[in-house]
Amino acid sequence: MLRSGPGGEDRPIAGVRHAPAVASRQGLPPLALLCAGLLPAGVTAPARAEDQLTPVLASVLATPAAAPMGDGRWVLPYELVLTNVTAVPQTLESLQVLDPARSAGPLLTLSGAALSGNLQLPGAHGTTVLGPGQSAVLLINASFGSREALPQRLIHRLTVSNAGGVPDLPRRSDEEVAPAVVDRREPVVLAAPLRGDRWVAAASCCNSYHRRSVLPVNGARHLAQRFAIDWIQLEPGNQLAKGDPSLNSSYPQFGREALAVAEATVVHVQDGLPEGRPGTFAPGVTAANADGNSVVLDLGAGRFALYAHLQPGSLRVKVGDRVRRGQVLGLVGNSGNSDAAHLHFHVMDGPSPLASNGLPYGIDRFEVTGRAVSSTDLDAELRTPLKPVPVLPVPGPSLRRNQLPTDLQVVRFLP
């Protein structure tokens, strides 16, 4: 940190409030004289916006892009990286998400518990205080009734405060930060990665462990799992397993065929990693093997699809293969960073499952048959897998087209 910055221990910042006003043209540089001479008589140059100290810097982690959700909403999930660049603690009081093209007030306001609950600060929970030099990631979820209602641009008004007593640093600041352009392209529409019914979209967008998996990879923050889903199948009686729960084969999704969601090219294959034991995470998991036995497809147009945690020896493709929609890639397993058989699927903007940015997508046809009741995205329920999972019914099967199933929706994939 520069010691002369706001909150530093040295002199006040030169040039911010102590710069003398210019009283005549005598001391102006030639370029300024030239520009001044171009103004018509009686016309003065427009006033430049006053410089503002911004003790907390902010930027978007990645270009915001919206997903069409299975409940009819369009959700715009994105993240701000916040950094306190001063030598004193700064308290985040509120954040407003604004559309510069409209004057009807903020699209979203976060404060209090809504702010602290969405702030990822390493080593701390439930706080909105950034220590000197600290950075945090703020998760933002803005919802809209239609694609047409999505903004084209965003700006953020961040209100921060400190205890005061620091020269040149206001005790309270209202900052306009992190301007961003919204990616308004239509999300890619894909076939389902599985067949059958009673599939639970566990940890889907937008407030799950997937969404909170911002990882430092190759020198930068990435959130490849922003729109990821862990697909888990229920038994006909809504149990998660039948028989001995310590065996992978007792779980109905184990061994199901994972299907290509589009015509694509295989760009990554990993095989040979052992199955884990249900209820425990395998030791020795690293960034290189966290996805277990896996396949990455190049869908074209800068989009890639990851299939993770497949059974060892079940992969039926190799790098360079062209696959067709519906082709079997492998079998659902429990390899890698996994404690229960499931298919982890997400779409991203690069071939690396970790060093990429998660992208929205929709599934072309599925029916919503219910919603599982769980406060932990089925993590707690997997500890008692023989007990039925509560499922809220829906009034008759509900057909969805080109949407992303919402968290814990129970769906039937249609051919």
Image: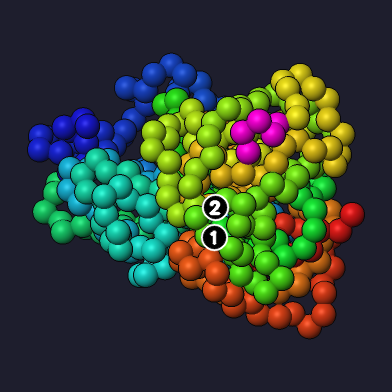
Label of residue 143 in the image: none
Q: Say whether residue 188 is visible.
A: no
- The picture quadrant where one finds residue 297 is top right
Relative to 217, say whether 67 is above or below. Answer: below
Secondary structure under badge 2? loop
**Residue on which disc 1 sits:** 244
The residue that label 2 is drawn on is 247
Locate the N terminus by quadrant: top left
Place of residue 147 in the rendered image (x, y in percent of width and height, measured from the top left): 75, 59
Question: Residue furthest toward the top?
Answer: 30
Residue 389 is inside the magenta segment: no
Residue 313 located within the stretch drawn in magenta: yes
Q: Using the image, determine if residue 361 lies above or below residue 237.
A: above
Q: Which residues are magenta?
A: 311-315
Residue in the foreground of this view, choosing between 187 and 129: 187
Residue drawn 80% across the image and 53% down it: 195
Please give the name of the residue rendered at 61% of the width and 28% of the height, measured from the top-left corner.
271
Residue occupying image coordinates x 42% and y 68% = 114
The image quarter containing residue 306 is top right
Q: Secondary structure at mark 1?
A: loop
Q: Position of residue 126 (x, y in %)?
A: 30, 63
Locate residue 307 relative to residue 166 in the image: left or right: right
State if disc 1 and disc 2 touch (CB < 8 Å). Answer: yes
Pick the front one: 308 or 128: 308
